[in-house]
Image: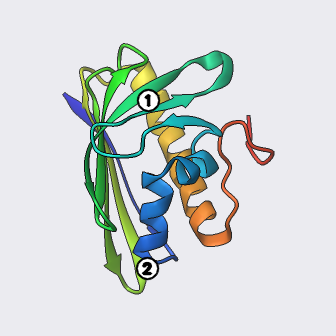
Amino acid sequence: MTSIKNLFHINSPKEKVYKAISTIDGLSNWWTTQTTGEDKVDGIIQFRFGDFGGADMKVTDMKPNESISWECVGGPDDWIGTTFTFKLDENDGKTRVRFEQAGWKEANDYYASCAFSWGRYMESLRQYCQTGNGEAFGSEGYRK
């Protein structure tokens, strides 16, 4: 099993970053505008990407302003059963974000494509938290 990991800093308070990763409104502004569901423990959040399909995430843990975890319960075969974790802490006056998508069965071409895309979406998260404008899939600013 392998993981995709990202570590980066956002020049915004942890509370703002946590809201961006833990609410339907926040997620819709940096990942995909087609986000629906229940943003609470045991809730299912649906992320859709137009004709590309999407994924359903079960919220498995929420620690306000510290972390959130999901398990993929619907979507691409390679994603089913993988877990997603965002951990936040303060570092040099910024919010440090540790992101991980764990449980990949193999590091195949789809894994490599997703690793690249996660980097892009993490930058969208940073821009959303710092400027109020992310580049979520489906938004005006989204780069195809």
| Residue 120 image offset from top left, x and y in percent | 57, 46
Q: Alpha carbon of mark 2 to alpha carbon of mark 1: how far?
A: 29 Å
| 47 up-or-down from 108: above or below | below
The residue that appears at 24% across and 20% down in the rendered structure is 105
Q: Nearer the viewer, residue 4 or 124?
A: 124
Q: Is residue 79 visible?
A: no
- Upstream in the sequence, badge 2 or badge 1? 2
Q: Which picture quadrant has residue 138?
A: top right
Instruction: Tell me: 41 left or right of 8.
Output: left
Give the label, 2 or 1, closer to the camera. 2
Measured as percent of width and height from the top left, residue 130 is found at 61, 71
Quarter of the image with the C terminus is top right
Q: Most extreme residue toward the right, as rendered?
A: 140
Q: Is residue 21 left or right of residue 85?
A: right
> Residue at label 2?
94
> Local crowd at mark 2 within 10 Å, few (<14), some, or many (≥20)?
some
Q: Is residue 80 above or below residue 115?
A: above
Q: Is residue 78 visible?
A: yes
Q: Residue furthest top?
A: 77
User: Which residue in the rendered view is the most extreme toward the left?
Assistant: 1
Q: Position of residue 99 (x, y in %)?
A: 35, 51
Q: Residue at x 27, y 21 (%)?
A: 106
Write down the quadrant of residue 72 in the picture. top left
Question: Could you tell whether 100 is left or right of 136 in the image?
Answer: left
Determine the residue positioned at 60% across, 50% down.
30
The residue beneath circle 1 is: 112
Check residue 103 in the rendering and tell me which mark sits there, or answer none.
none
Q: Residue type at mark 1: give it.
A: Ala
Q: Within the image, what quadrant is residue 132 found in?
A: bottom right
What amino acid does circle 2 point to?
A: Lys
- Residue 105 in the figure: left or right of residue 122: left
SS for dot 1 = helix
